[in-house]
C-alpha cells in the first residue's frame, strides 16, 4: 500500500510522535464519547419520553443501522473514487447538524418518535460514509507496519468512550432529559471536524481508471475480493452473525433493564460503561496476545471470549450483587474479545487488500458484517414482545455461539502473522489472477 510521504517515525510507538495521526486520534476521542451518548440517549428518549414498546425500540435501532444494508456498497465505490479526508469532514458536519436538531425539536415541542426514526436513519447513512472513509484513509496516513499500532490506539479511544460514554449519557439523560443530552454529541462532532481540518499530510489522489467502469461493476469487484478470499470472507460472515445477535441483545437489554429490573438511566449507563472496561483491556493487550499465540490462534481465543460471554446476562437472577457482577462480566468479556479481534481482522484486511480496492472491500465487509444489524434489532424487538425479554436474551446467547463456526472452520486459525503483501486485484480486472492467492 502507498502512503503520501515516507517521513515520520518508524520505530515501535512512533505514532505518539506523529502529529498528523494525533490530530485524527484526538478528534476521534471526543467524537467517540459523544457518539456513545447518542447510542444510549436515542433509545432512552424513546423509552422514557414516548413509552416505546419493544417493537418500536427495535424499529429505532433498525433505522440507525439500515444504511449499512442499503447504501454501504454504493458508498464504497464513491470512497474509492475520491480523497477520503474531505468525505470524513462532510459526514461529521452532517451528523453534528442532525444530532443537534433533536434537542432543537424538543425545545420547540415538535419532537416525535417518527422524527427519531428519520434522524437515526440519516445519521446512519453519514456514519457509513465516515466509517468506510476512515478505514480506507488510515493506510494512507500512516505506514503499513504501524497499522496494528494505529488501529489499537483508535480502538483504545473507542473503548474509553464506551467506559465513560454510557455513564455520562445516563447522568445527562437523568439531569437534562434524553433529547437535550444529545447536544454533547453534536458538540463532539464539531471538535472532531476541527481535528480533521488540521491534518496537513497530503493524501494521494485516487488512481484514475484506465477505462470507465460502471458502478455495478465496481461494486462487483469489491464483493468478489471479499467473497473469494477465504480469510476476508470468514471474518466478515462471523462479524455479520455476531452483530445480528449483538443488536438483538442491545435492543432487548435496555428494555429488560428499565422495565423488568427497574434500573434507572444512570444505572443502565453505569452497567454498560463499567462493562466496557474490557474493551480498553482488549485494545491494550491485542498486540501481546498476537505475539504470544500467533495471529490466527489469537483471533480464535478472542472470538470464543466474546461469543460465550452473553449467556451470563439471562442467567443473572435479578438486580442483586451477583446479578450486577454477571452483567458487568458479560459486557467486559464481550468488550475484550470483540475489540482484540476487531484490531486484528481490520489490520489483516488493510494489509491484504490492494489500495485501489480498499474502499470497496471495506464497504463489502461492512455490508456483510453490519447489514444484519437492523434485522437483529427487528428480531430482538419482535421476540421481546412475543416470547418475553429474558427468553429472547437466552435465544440470542445461543446465536452468538454459532458465529464462531465461520472462523473455526476457515483457514484463519492457521495464520501465524500478517501476509507480506497485498493480494492481487480481482480476476475481472487483472488478466484472470485469482483473488484468494493466500490460500
Image (tube, rainbow, N blue to C red):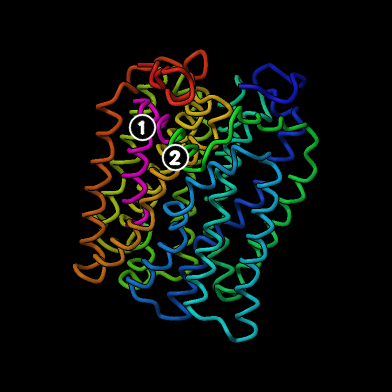
In the picture, measured across the screen, residue 206 lies left or right of residue 402, that is: right
Q: Which quadrant: the C terminus?
A: top left
Q: Are marks 2 and 1 in contact (CB under 8 Å)?
A: yes
Count of numbered labels shown in the rendering: 2
- Name the element at disc 1: helix
Instruction: Report the magenta residues as a range.
Output: 223-249
Q: Is residue 293 visible?
A: no
Q: Nearer the viewer, residue 27 or 423?
A: 423
In the picture, measured across the screen, residue 52 lies left or right of residue 21, that is: left
- 148 drawn magenta: no
Residue 310 in the image: state x and y as whole percent: 30, 48
Q: Is residue 101 visible?
A: yes
In the picture, measured across the screen, residue 182 lies left or right of residue 409, that is: right
The residues tagged by marks 2 and 1 sit, at their Cα atoms, a distance apart of: 9 Å
Residue 312 in the image: state x and y as whole percent: 28, 50
User: Which numbered tag is attached to residue 227?
Assistant: 1
Which residue sits at x=77%, y=50%?
Answer: 194
Which residue sits at x=62%, y=66%?
Answer: 98
Where residue 190 sits, quadrant-wise, is: bottom right
Report the predominant secondary structure element of the magenta stretch: helix
- 225 drawn magenta: yes
In the picture, measured across the screen, residue 397 lies left or right of residue 192, that is: left
Amino acid at each position: 500500500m502507498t502512503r503520501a510521504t515516507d517521513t515520520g517515525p518508524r520505530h515501535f510507538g512512533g505514532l505518539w510522535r506523529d502529529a498528523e495521526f494525533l490530530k485524527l486520534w484526538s478528534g476521534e476521542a471526543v467524537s467517540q464519547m459523544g457518539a456513545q451518548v447518542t447510542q444510549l440517549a436515542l433509545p432512552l428518549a424513546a423509552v422514557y419520553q414516548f413509552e416505546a414498546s419493544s417493537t418500536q425500540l427495535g424499529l429505532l435501532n433498525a433505522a440507525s443501522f439500515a444504511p449499512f444494508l442499503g447504501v454501504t456498497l454504493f458508498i464504497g465505490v464513491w470512497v474509492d473514487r475520491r480523497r477520503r479526508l474531505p468525505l470524513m469532514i462532510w459526514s461529521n458536519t452532517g451528523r453534528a447538524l442532525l444530532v443537534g436538531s433533536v434537542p432543537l425539536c424538543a425545545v420547540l415541542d415538535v419532537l416525535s418518535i417518527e422524527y427519531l426514526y428519520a434522524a437515526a436513519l440519516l445519521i446512519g447513512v453519514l456514519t457509513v460514509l465516515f466509517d468506510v472513509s476512515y478505514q480506507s484513509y488510515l493506510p494512507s496516513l500512516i505506514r503499513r507496519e504501524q497499522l496494528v499500532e494505529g488501529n489499537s490506539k483508535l480502538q483504545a479511544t473507542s473503548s474509553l468512550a464506551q467506559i465513560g460514554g454510557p455513564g455520562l449519557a445516563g447522568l445527562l439523560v437523568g439531569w437534562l432529559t434524553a433529547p437535550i443530552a444529545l447536544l454533547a454529541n453534536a458538540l463532539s462532532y464539531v471538535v472532531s471536524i476541527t481535528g480533521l481540518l488540521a491534518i496537513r499530510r497530503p493524501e494521494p489522489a485516487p488512481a484514475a481508471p484506465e477505462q470507465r467502469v460502471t458502478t455495478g461493476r465496481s461494486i462487483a469487484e469489491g464483493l468478489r475480493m471479499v467473497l473469494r478470499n477465504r480469510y476476508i470472507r470468514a471474518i466478515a460472515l462471523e462479524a455479520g452473525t455476531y452483530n445480528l445477535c449483538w443488536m438483538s441483545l442491545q435492543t432487548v437489554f435496555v428494555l429488560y433493564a428499565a422495565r423488568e429490573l427497574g434500573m434507572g438511566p444512570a444505572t443502565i449507563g453505569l452497567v454498560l460503561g463499567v462493562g466496557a472496561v474490557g474493551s480498553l483491556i482488549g485494545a491494550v493487550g491485542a498486540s501481546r496476545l498476537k505475539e504470544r499465540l500467533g495471529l490466527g490462534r489469537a483471533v480464535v481465543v478472542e472470538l470464543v471470549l466474546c461469543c460465550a460471554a452473553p449467556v451470563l446476562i439471562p442467567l443473572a437472577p435479578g438486580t442483586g450483587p451477583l446479578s450486577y457482577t454477571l452483567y458487568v462480566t458479560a459486557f467486559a468479556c464481550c468488550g475484550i474479545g470483540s475489540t482484540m479481534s476487531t484490531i486484528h481482522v481490520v489490520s489483516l484486511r488493510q494489509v491484504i487488500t490492494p489500495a485501489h480496492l480498499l474502499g470497496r472491500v471495506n464497504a463489502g465487509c461492512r455490508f456483510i458484517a453490519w447489514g444484519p444489524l437492523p434485522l437483529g434489532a427487528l428480531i430482538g424487538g419482535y421476540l421481546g414482545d412475543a416470547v418475553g425479554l429474558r427468553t429472547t436474551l437466552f435465544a440470542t446467547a445461543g446465536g452468538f455461539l454459532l458465529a464462531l463456526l465461520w472462523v473455526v472452520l476457515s483457514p484463519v486459525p492457521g495464520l501465524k502473522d500478517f501476509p507480506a503483501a497485498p493480494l492481487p486485484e480481482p480476476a475481472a480486472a487483472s488478466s484472470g489472477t485469482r483473488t484468494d492467492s493466500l490460500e
